[in-house]
Image: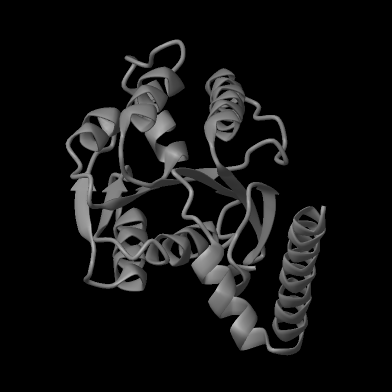
Amino acid sequence: MVGNVIKRHDRVSSSILHLSLLKLALIILRLNPRKRSHWSAIIFTFPKFSLILGGVASGKSRFAESLVRLANRPRTYIATAQAFDSEMEEKIKQHQMDRGPDWSTIEAPIAVPEALAKVDDTQVVLIDCMTLWLSNLILSENCPEDPSAPLLSVVKSSNFPIVTVSNEVGHSVIPDTKLGRRFQKDQGRLNAKLAAEADLVVMVTAGIPKVLKGRLPANLT
């Protein structure tokens, strides 16, 4: 009888202690932003698959690069852009300067699933971007009915984190050409399928991230 009372008392005391420590930690985190960011980074588990959405020049690529750096892994950049004119050449150069030299780059305007399959498990991968990849597929006249299927198959079987960047085209006007309307529809469907599989989905507007799915560390919110 006495033994059972002592055991119950010990359990209650232990629960009170845990609650007190939790309350103390919450108070510290509220009062000290640096501690909050520090502990958030520790608790934060880097997502296996992330989708970063945004309009043109919204800051989505810069945000995605900041997210990738939090993985603390060697970084691989899968580039889908092709420099068909001087303007695109300058844009690609600017992206390279913004990223810095500490990235391995794979040029894959069409063969993104194949490029992913060759990446070492120690890496974190940024694919920039899904929009150019889809447009390249459509213009090649060899676009599968569901381009997300081979990509997501590799994503699911991979053992490293993957961050993808894509344009949100649903907020724009309806194109006045048949090809434009097809692209807008296919891009919307591709984004929806990627978002359904993603652990983290973020919309970036005017450089400000809004989490649609999952969770970010405090120092990226």
Residue 90: percent from left, percent from top: 32, 63
Q: Quadrant of the C terminus?
A: bottom right
Query: Is 213 located above or below residue 134 in the figure?
Result: below
Q: Which corner quadrant of the image does residue 168 belong to?
A: top right
Q: Which corner quadrant of the image does residue 116 belong to?
A: top left
Residue 50: percent from left, percent from top: 50, 45
Q: Residue at x 75, y 81 (%)?
A: 24
Q: How many marks can you see?
A: 0
Which residue appears farthest toward the front when viewing the image? 1
Residue 161: percent from left, percent from top: 37, 47
Q: Nearer the viewer, residue 164 or 200?
A: 200
Q: Say whether residue 20 is visible.
A: yes
Q: Nearer the viewer, residue 192 or 47?
A: 47
Query: Is 106 located above or below residue 17 in the figure?
Result: above
Residue 158: percent from left, percent from top: 31, 34
Q: Say whether residue 83 is visible.
A: no
Q: Residue at x 60, y 87 (%)?
A: 34
